[in-house]
Image (tube, rainbow, N blue to C red):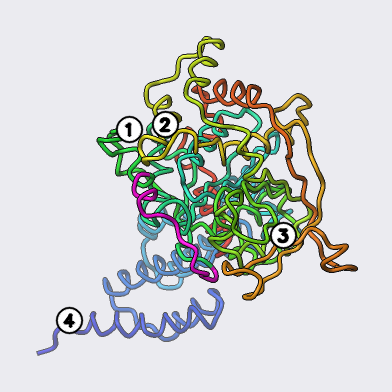
Amino acid sequence: MFDTRSSATSLTVGAFCGIGILLILIPSGIFLSLIQIYLPVHGSTLHYVQNQIQLFYMEYSADAENKAISSSQFAADSSNAQKQFNDEFGLPPVTNKVENMQHSNAERRDQKATQTATTGCCNSTSSTLSNIELVQNCIAQNINKNPIIIDTDSDIDDLWAILYLMNGPTIDILAVTTVGDGYSAPLYSASNVISMLGLVGCTDGVAVGSGLSTPSLPNGFILSSAILGGIDTYLSSPSCLNQSVNIYLQPSPFDSVELIVYALKYSQQPVDVLALGPFTNIAAAIVRDRSIIPKIGTLYVSGIYPYTSKTSGSSSNVFLDVLAVQRVDDSGIKKLVAIPSTVQKQLPTNISQVNMKLKQLNITLSPFIYGLITSLAKCTNQSESTIYWWDNSAAQLMVQLQNNVTNGFCTAFQNVESLYILSADADQLFGQGLTDFQNTRPNTNGLSNYTICTQTNSDTFLTEFLTKISSDKLYSCEKTYANRFDLKLQSCMSMYGLD
């Protein structure tokens, strides 16, 4: 017996097989003419196929987003094609479903055109802009502040520095990039920064990335596990600050090296980099993309200074990854500023002095912030006399020089040229930094120019530090999660198909 359902199904399947090829190979006008010749009139089946053809054609045309014609022309051409089809086969008007889709597709094209013109991302001038410029315009960075990247090993003095900079009105922290081969274990380096920000009221407001956890070239220099344990659990340990931290806070979708590369690459202006730990992340970023070097405005470093051996006055930040220091130091960065460890020892963290200064300034710190800056010796079983405002001083030095402060805490400077030499025979710690080129290497090229802070005023330093951390302004804390720099960057890169 002849099955009309099988016949209709066969007709429909056969039609769609041919339609799929014809829609790709031929214009719509010729396609409809061929339909007239080859498709037999089969009552309701033809009406069904007609609707499906039109639905498919509308979807195909809309998805193709043919920008050679306007959306109004697109709608008119489609309407004419439908009318021609109906007239040839004597069929009733097309269903509302098709008609509505035609109009909605046209409206969608108009809406997208209006939206992109409004955002300035994809208007008629976009063809003359580079991909970098398109992303920069999309991010809409605040160019009235000093953009910075903080690269940190998340030691406690680093947390002091981050808190200080968060309350700086002239600072725009694009990212905090953490490194796991310094004064915190890899698991805690990013986590402690994120937790500290949450505890001061900046939940998910700053991009924090996790970075590399092994040095570029291990040399045998390691840190005491006893000290590291106290640092890792500083915030939450019952024997230390005993804080309940939010474990659901959001780190960056980028790792630290990516954040450094992309923040420099897509910033509309040079970015200052504050290095508070080993240079492992920064060196890896430079190796990955050397075009970022000119985008580094000034590299500010804590403790780093050309040392010929690991002495009691030198910085562990050098010897934890000497190869990274050599790569960064000799990479061609135009401006480098450092406050050596020997100078940082002019700034002791004397709790009695802190209490006196708070009283003098009539400042009351929150219990958490007061404990954060006064508990390091106790929580790491060290003597108070061995604790200084180490990395925090580098942060304040950066703000002083960025804003041309004439009465800042650093009262004397020295300009020096340096070069790092890697030689296994130079020292057991595999590194040697040179400054006396007249005797050691005359006529040396490619030297790095350092500005060194050589003298400080501890009272000026403490006044500035306590005043800033007592504020709750948190200028660099983005109030809207989606507007955080790394998330805007990710969205804008995705918009233009960039990786």
Q: How far across and down, in percent of the image, does residue 344 sit?
A: 62, 39
- Residue numbers of the magenta segment: 216-230
Label 1 vs label 4, nearer the camera = 1
What residue type is disc 4 on? Thr
Could you tell me which secondary element the residue under label 4 belongs to?
A: helix
The mark that comes first in sequence, 3 or 4, is 4
Residue drawn at x 14%, y 84% as measured from the top left: 3
Q: Are marks 3 and 4 in contact (CB under 8 Å)?
A: no
The mark that comes first in sequence, 1 or 4, is 4
Q: Which residue is mark 1?
A: 241
Give whichever of 4, 117 is nearer the camera: 117
Q: Which residue is mark 4?
A: 4
Could you tell me which secondary element the residue under label 1 belongs to?
A: loop
The mark that comes first in sequence, 2 or 1, is 1
Could you tell me which secondary element the residue under label 2 belongs to?
A: helix
What residue type is disc 1 on? Leu
Mark 2 surroundings within 10 Å by alpha-carbon count, few (fewer than 14), some (14 through 19), many (20 or more): some
Q: Are marks 2 and 1 in contact (CB under 8 Å)?
A: yes
Give the distance between the C-alpha atoms of the residues marked 4 and 2, in whole angstroms. 82 Å
Give whichever of 329, 250 is nearer the camera: 329
What residue type is disc 3 on? Ile
Q: Which residue is mark 2?
A: 372
